[in-house]
Image (cartoon, helix red, strand yellow):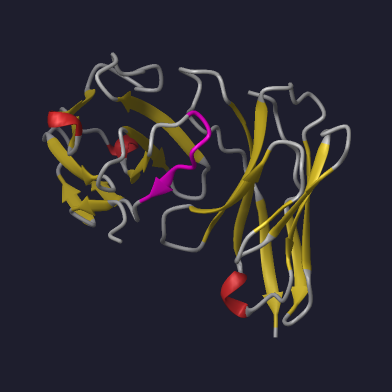
Amino acid sequence: DAKTTQPTSMDCAEGRAANLPCNHSTISGNEYVYWYRQIHSQGPQYIIHGLKNNETNEMASLIITEDRKSSTLILPHATLRDTAVYYCIVRSSNFGNEKLTFGTGTRLTIIP
Amino acid sequence: GAGVSQSPSNKVTEKGKDVELRCDPISGHTALYWYRQSLGQGLEFLIYFQGNSAPDKSGLPSDRFSAERTGGSVSTLTIQRTQQEDSAVYLCASSSGHRTSPLHFGNGTRLTVT
């Protein structure tokens, strides 16, 4: 799977939009971008995923650049409960390669 | 609906003892994954089951580790002759089995080997 690069840590003020960047310059055509987060002492929580179109759900929006070499996860109105480690993962859609490979993620801290 | 359930939530064992960790996936999910996370570290893939196919065991760190999935549902991860370096949180995830369906994780079993 393609490697991703994320900032180690970020801060965001409560109530503001949190924009988490991810670089995946070696992504291939059949690889999707997934975002997960992990709150302390819990298992990773699925947020959103996409291939090339922008995606939105009740948790977040995912913006993928046209060349697909980078993406941004947007939490529109961050709350203190959004403090977590956020993982950007590129995952193959080929049969037999469905496992997720986690990197070190971005530690997002929401500031009151 | 119910999510992925793991038991026990915490397990303390003595070095050299065997342990079994259980995972109940989301009902109807055909794919099941085991990961582990050592303190302050990222998630490390261990093993993957998909339907009746042979499991992908490529992440198991040694032959002391094994896993099985009975009846295509519940899975048990067994660690024989535990060592202190086996101390970690063991996480189970399941998915519907479609190639792009997301994994849904349980909250893990925290294993401490003394």
Q: Residue at x 82, y 34 (%)?
A: A68
Query: Which quarter of the picture shows residue B96?
Result: top left
Viewer-closest of B42 and B6: B6
Q: Main secondary structure of the magenta part?
A: loop
Viewer-closest of B54 and B7: B54
Q: Is residue B96 left or right of residue A83?
A: left
Where is B57 relative to B97, above or below? above
Q: Residue at x 50, y 20 (%)?
A: A97
Query: Which quarter of the picture shows residue B47?
Result: top left
- Which stretch appears magenta? B99-105
Q: Residue at x 68, y 63 (%)?
A: A108
Residue A33, given in percent of the width and then of the height, sits at 67, 38
Q: Is residue B29 left or right of residue A73?
A: left
Can residue B79 be found in the magenta stretch?
no
Residue B54, given in percent of the width and then of the height, sits at 28, 13
Position of the N terminus of chain B by quadrant = bottom left
Residue B89, given in percent of the width and then of the height, sits at 35, 47
Query: Which quarter of the picture shows residue A25?
Result: top right
Where is A82 relative to A105, above or below? below
Q: Residue at x 25, y 53 (%)?
A: B5
Can residue B101 be found in the magenta stretch?
yes
